[in-house]
Amino acid sequence: MDLELIGALIRLRYKLLWAKTRTRNGKIALFMSGYLLLVFVLVVLAAGGFGAGMVAVRSGKAEWIARAVLSGLFLNALMAAIILGFGMNAVFSDAALRRYPLQAIDRLAARHLIGMLDPFWYLFLALELGLAIGLYALGAGGFWVGVAAVLLLFVSNYLCARVLGLLVERLMARRAGAAVLLALILLLSLLPAAVTPALRKHPEALEPVIRVLSFTPPFGAAAAMTGAGMKTLFGVALLICWLVGLTLALVTLERRPVETRAAQSTTISWESNFERLGSFFGPPLATLIAHWLRFYSRNNRFRTVFAIALPLAAFLMISWGRRGVAPAQFAAALSAFAILGCMGGTQAAVNQFGYVDTGFRRLLLMPVRPADVLRASSYTLLLVNATLIPVGTLVFVIVRPIAFDARMLVMLVGMAVTGLFLLHGLGLWATVLGPRRADYYSSFGNDLSALGNVVVLGGMLSLMFVPQILAQAAPNALAPDYWWILVVLAVTAAAFYFVSLRRTGAMLLLRRESLLCILEGRR
């Protein structure tokens, strides 16, 4: 293996990374690293803080502490890598590395060493090393064995993310892939909430689950860190088996090309449902809205996120509303409706021209104003996302998860409408001021600009947690007597949206050359 050349490629990777740190990637990496670290600290403090962890370690529960922390970090890394795309960028493809005097094994090692040494993974490696050192300081584990277990778990986590990412890509390449993936996401999301009450009543049913989980990489690393003798050997051997299995799976998947779908008919239809829906908006926008409806209906990422919005809102309402107190239950419902109002189309709303790529130039050549192109795209996303609100309201009325009256229903709809107009209004500014060239055919990943990420993550998290904070600080603020406040907020958000639409439409004409440079890859 040519280690010198592989090292040169890794150094080149970091030079490129440093060049991008001043733009989008660096800002997003710093933002996400700080966010994940904050979440981790909040979870630790919510669980009783470091003092409670020290008491648990000294009372002989060190392995359980290690299992819980390592499993949480392992799952967080998987979700962030697969869904958001962090730490999964293929900087050098196999075809690009063929220009260098490298053998097949060298190219494989170079690609995955570069991916594994992405700064995103450093955060999780640092947290896991911190756990190993902490256990050693408390006398609950060995130093070198703990470090070795962390390194093996770190590599396993990366390989697992790569394998799952390739499986998702191949699944989405099939016709029914989006539906199958949606069913899996719903199953994984709703299963814990459905199973937890039964496990509390019957704790003995948890034992078979623990036995199965004991063969996972986090549990193996926990056994290696805190065990002694055969237990440590079992944990290390388990991690090595996972490494070998994941490596073989990764090599097998990379050697099998993705199956492409059959070419669709290129016959133009002027009487489809898209044209009929677009005709309600009059001649200036009819054709454009029909175009955007067809454009987003064929995008796997948009369809998947749109379909997840309603189940995710139901999951939040069920999981957060189990606290037994009426204000907390209603706050959970408000958070769920806020997500329902903005999640379906927000990712596309903050980067409306990014997925068009070089087609943005053709949109500017149409016999309409550039502002009409932006208006048609925004109206399409707004109306498609708005269809979730009546559906969610109808489901809420039928299921009745909490006791409510008509005024509370008005507050829930007002919260959803507020989130809808607020996030889409902010999305207009992000579209014009922070565009980003994106891949239309990518099913998952984070391809938004720094401004787009701030709008999506910051806006959705704010809408989710503001009702929770109010329920704790001022429960009376969520009383039905104050239903009119949500109506005022909804009207204010709608006014903000239409003002933003007018201002960004005028700004689009001034910034069209800058947008063309970004979307065509010239900058």
Image (tube, grey):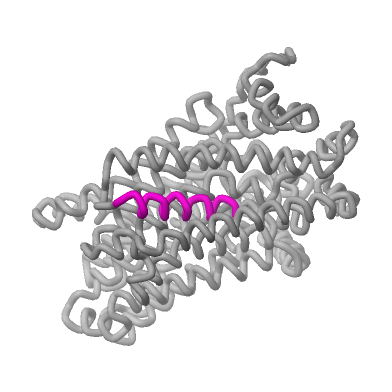
Queried whether the magenta region covers residue 412, the answer comes back as yes
At which x and y percent is residue 442? 62, 40
Residue 519 position (above or below residue 383): below
- Which percent across, then down, holds residue 456? 58, 57
Task: Specify the segment rendered in magenta.
Answer: 405-421
Q: Is residue 120 visible?
A: yes
Quadrant in which the C terminus is drawn: bottom right
What residue is drawn where x is 20% and y is 51%?
209
Q: Residue at x 23, y 50 (%)?
A: 212
Nearer to us in this view, 444 or 387: 387
Q: Quadrant of residue 348?
A: top right
Does residue 513 appear left or right of residue 27 in this picture? right
| Residue 240 found in image quarter | bottom left
Where does the image place residue 249, in percent across and percent down from the top left?
46, 41
Numbered label tally: 0
Relative image position of residue 28 (x, y in whole percent): 64, 64
Is residue 468 placed above or below 168 in the rendered structure? below
